Amino acid sequence: MKIFFTYCKLLCLSLCILLISTEVQAQDQSTPVYGCTDVNASNYDSSADTENGSCVYIGCTDVNASNYDPSATISSFCIYKGCTDSTSPNYDPDANTDDGSCEYLGCIDEFAFNYDSTANVLDDSCYPVIEGCTDTLADNYVNVVGDVFVDINISDNYLCEYLGCTYSYMFNYDTLANVDDGSCYPEIFGCMDSTAYNYVELSGDVQVDVNTDDGSCYEVVYGCLDTIADNHNDYDLDGHTNQLTGENGIDVNTHDNNLCIYYGCINELAFNYDSLANTNNNSCYPVITGCLDVNADNYNDYDGDGYSNDLTGVHTTDVNTNDSTLCLHYGCMDTLAFNYDTLANSNTACEEVVYG
């Protein structure tokens, strides 16, 4: 662009010189007309009759350019031929005029898989057409390894092999299989509902495991199967034991210990607390503390009068928890008395010793 503007300025300069020369000539026809008299010069003046050394020669002054002009005194646009396609490996960033020399590497073998019609230079990248099975579900499919001389690049699914059971009367008959692999196994009937009581867990042996449901399933019946519980086989959920009926799906068949009911006193503070019980039956009665020493003078003193009482047989009345510190043994506690009682802990009338 700079060269173009320089050229324009020189051209304008030449025109200005030509105009001035013409004007001077018009003023005095007898005066010599100076100017550039070289017809090859850019500022050649056809009216000039006297050379004044002002000739200007515009052209390319770069010896490396294709249009180099050795006679040029002022440089103009230079042509640099070469490959101007930046995608070509021999791209010349200095070239401004394409000369058709661009090279495009690739496979130029028409029989190769990767033949490149746009390439004009062989780069040894050619690799052959390799036919085979490309269905990843096929048993003879070969994984791509990244080697173009080995990997299949043309799919031919007629070459695919699908292994499986090809006998239509077998349970695992495979309609897609075209090569029998000896994997066939028969239909085996039974309960297949995994939530049913009589479902049999799969063992992993296809020759044994049930694969066809025959409608024989019956449900899981949860309940208590502890014979000492108070609701053994409680299939009607009334909280009481039932006799076994022998009918599948009615009798409890799956034990759940959380469903067992053991009636009793569940109050830990009660005298008759039952550690096995989980359901209160209102049988609790309190701890009644007192003296249960039959030799004490306040045995079973439930009325607190300091004297013994006969057992009533009433759980909420009779003393049921012994506290020996509450037992009273009346007697003389004076060791100097005649009737001193070593067992006594509650003093009564003492008799003095009388000698004689």
Image (spheres, rainbow, N blue to C red):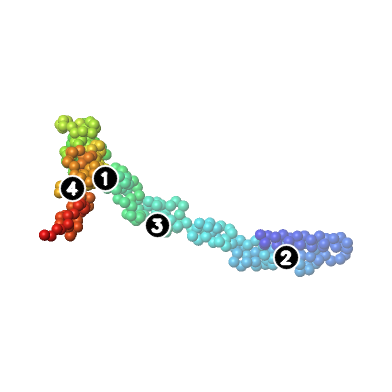
Point out which mark residue 297 bears.
Answer: 4
Give x and y (percent) for residue 300: 19, 44
Can residue 19 be seen at all in this image of the molecule?
yes
Q: Which residue is mark 1?
A: 269
Q: Is residue 300 above or below residue 238?
A: below
In the rendered image, which quarter is residue 302 located in?
top left
Query: What residue is rendered at 31% in x and 43% in y?
Result: 157
Q: Quadrant of residue 333?
A: bottom left
Q: Which residue appears farthest toward the front when viewing the image?
A: 356
Nearer to us in this view, 128 or 252: 252
Q: CA distance from mark 2 to mark 4?
A: 156 Å
Q: Answer whether labels 1 and 2 touch (C-beta < 8 Å).
A: no
Kind of residue indicated by mark 4: Asp
Of tags 1 and 2, the one toward the viewer is 1
Q: Which residue is mark 3?
A: 125
* Mark 1, other Cα within 10 Å: few <14 / some 14–19 / many ≥20: few
Q: Is residue 192 visible?
A: no
Q: Is residue 10 above or below residue 301?
A: below
Query: Which residue bears the numbered disc 2?
Result: 56
| Image side of residue 284 versus residue 32, left or right | left
Looking at the rendered structure, the number of numbered marks drawn on it comes to: 4
Q: Nearer the viewer, mark 4 or mark 3?
A: 4
